[in-house]
Amino acid sequence: MALRACGLIIFRRFYAGALASTLPEIQFLLLQTSYGQHHWTPPKGHVDPGEDDLQTALRETEEEAGLKSKDFNVLDGYKKEIIYTVNNKPKTVIYWLAEVKDHNTEIKLSDEHQTFCWLNVEEACKLAKYQEMQEALREAHQFISNK
């Protein structure tokens, strides 16, 4: 049976400059796992029986990052499906794109993760070592930039 997981690519608009008129930097939230190779990904997890994919993404984001659905907006029009192999079995991960409402929103990690960071798209792609994840982050950045 194929593995299936769902999650949210979370981003914020961060104003680094002193002037409010400066363009915001788009930063993505990545979590570092506390198991295995300590890889970096957006919050995601396996679909539980009776859940639809988006319910899974929302639940996993709350469990892994402490973000409740009131803390962010899921953007219409972006849904990315990634398929890769884990232990010689295909795994499908579906991501939606969500923007936190307050760039200072507190992240509360579960014991599945040891740390997190907010990164611009290039920094995020360096940490997310899998090509499929890098492509998803770049596509998400392009989607945000075109809105």
Image (tube, helix red, strand yellow):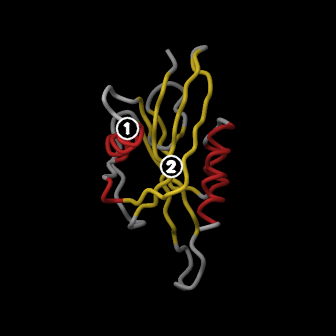
Horizontally, residue 10 falls left or right of residue 127, namely left
- Local crowd size for mark 2, using a 10 Å CA cut-off: few (<14), some (14–19), many (≥20): many
x%, y% of residue 134? 66, 44
What label does residue 56 carry, if any? 1
Q: For residue 129, what is the image quadrant?
A: top right
42, 115: nearer the viewer? 42
Residue 3 position (above or below residue 23)? above
Residue 35 occupies which quadrant of the picture? top left
Query: Residue at horizontal 59%, vertical 81%?
Result: 22
Q: Residues within 10 Å of mark 1 (few under 14, many from 20)?
A: many
Real-space Cα distance between discs 1 and 2? 13 Å
Secondary element at tag 1: helix
State the image coordinates of residue 97 (x, y, percent, origin top left): 50, 53
Q: Which residue is at 35% across, 44% downward?
A: 109
Residue 9: where, in percent of width, then height? 50, 49
- Numbered marks: total: 2
Residue indicated by mark 2: 9
Residue 18 numbered mark, or none: none
SS of the residue under disc 2 = strand
* Circle 1/circle 2 CB separation < 8 Å: no
Q: Nearer the viewer, mark 1 or mark 2?
A: 1
The C terminus lies in quadrant: bottom right
Give the percent coordinates (x, y) of residue 113.
41, 37
Amino acid at pointer 2: Ile
Q: Which amino acid does the dot numbered 1 rest on? A: Thr
Residue at point 61%, 22% (across, down): 85
Question: Relative to residue 132, is residue 71 depicted above or below?
Answer: below
